[in-house]
Amino acid sequence: MTNLERLKMSIEGINIEDNKLLIYLEENSLISTDNYNPQSNTNKKQILKTSLSILEDIANNPQTMKNYKTDDTTISNFAENLQNRIDQLEKKIRQIPDDMFNDNGSSFFYLFTN
């Protein structure tokens, strides 16, 4: 699976042209044709950051912030739900340890020793 395919899986239901997705990936230091490595925390973070960028751009579009009502369905509070998802993604990104740290996620090191 490539980074582009993994990103599409992450934003399933959001239709964006591939050439725009390529730009989002490049902005987050990912190459679309590289293989996605699920064991790499860095790769996971970059995919999530790319998804976050897409959601933030959607949130910047005032046309999407309306409440919609059809015959039997109401879609309301889109802006609130979108912001909740953005907050969830930000929290998840912060909780993923970097690859350079050990397995327990600690970033502690000794600056001074005896």
Image (spheres, rainbow, N blue to C red):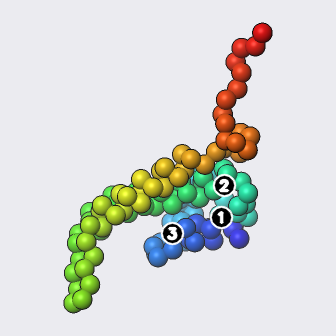
Kindly indicate whether the residue at mark 2 contacts the one at mark 1 (C-beta within 8 angstroms).
yes
Q: Amino acid at mark 1?
A: Asn
> Residue 11: which numbered mark, if any?
3
Residue topped by disc 1: 3
Whether residue 63 can be seen here: no
Quadrant position of the C terminus in the picture: top right
Residue 28 place in picture, x, y as percent: 57, 52
Task: Give the amino acid type for the residue marked by disc 3 in the picture.
Answer: Ile
Residue at screen point 30% across, 67% down: 78
- Expressed as whole percent of the image width and height from the top left, the position of residue 3 reads 65, 64
Q: Is residue 53 left or right of residue 39?
A: left
Task: List the single residue furthest toward the front.
Answer: 104
Dot 3 alpha-carbon crowd within 10 angstroms: few under 14, some 14 to 19, many 20 or more: some
Cα–Cα span, label 3 and label 1: 12 Å
Q: Residue at x 30, y 61 (%)?
A: 80
Instruction: First in sequence, mark 3 or 2: give its number.
Output: 3
Q: Is residue 72 left or right of residue 84?
A: left
* Towards the viewer: 22 or 38: 38
Compared to residue 93, the image places residue 51 above or below, namely below
* Residue type beneath disc 2: Asn
Dot 1 or dot 2, earlier in sequence: 1
Residue 65 spot, x, y in % from top left:
26, 65
Residue under numbered circle 2: 43
Q: Are marks 3 and 2 in contact (CB under 8 Å)?
A: no
Q: Where the N terminus falls, by quadrant?
A: bottom right
Residue 1 showing in the rendered view: yes
Report crowding for label 1: few under 14, some 14 to 19, many 20 or more residues within 10 A (C-alpha): many
- Tell which circle, 3 or 1, labels the residue nearer the N-terminal end: 1
- Label 2 neighbourhood size at 10 Å, few (<14), some (14-19), many (20+)? some
Q: Looking at the image, is 14 positioned above or below residue 89? A: below
- Residue 60 at x, y = what percent? 33, 58
Q: Residue furthest right?
A: 114
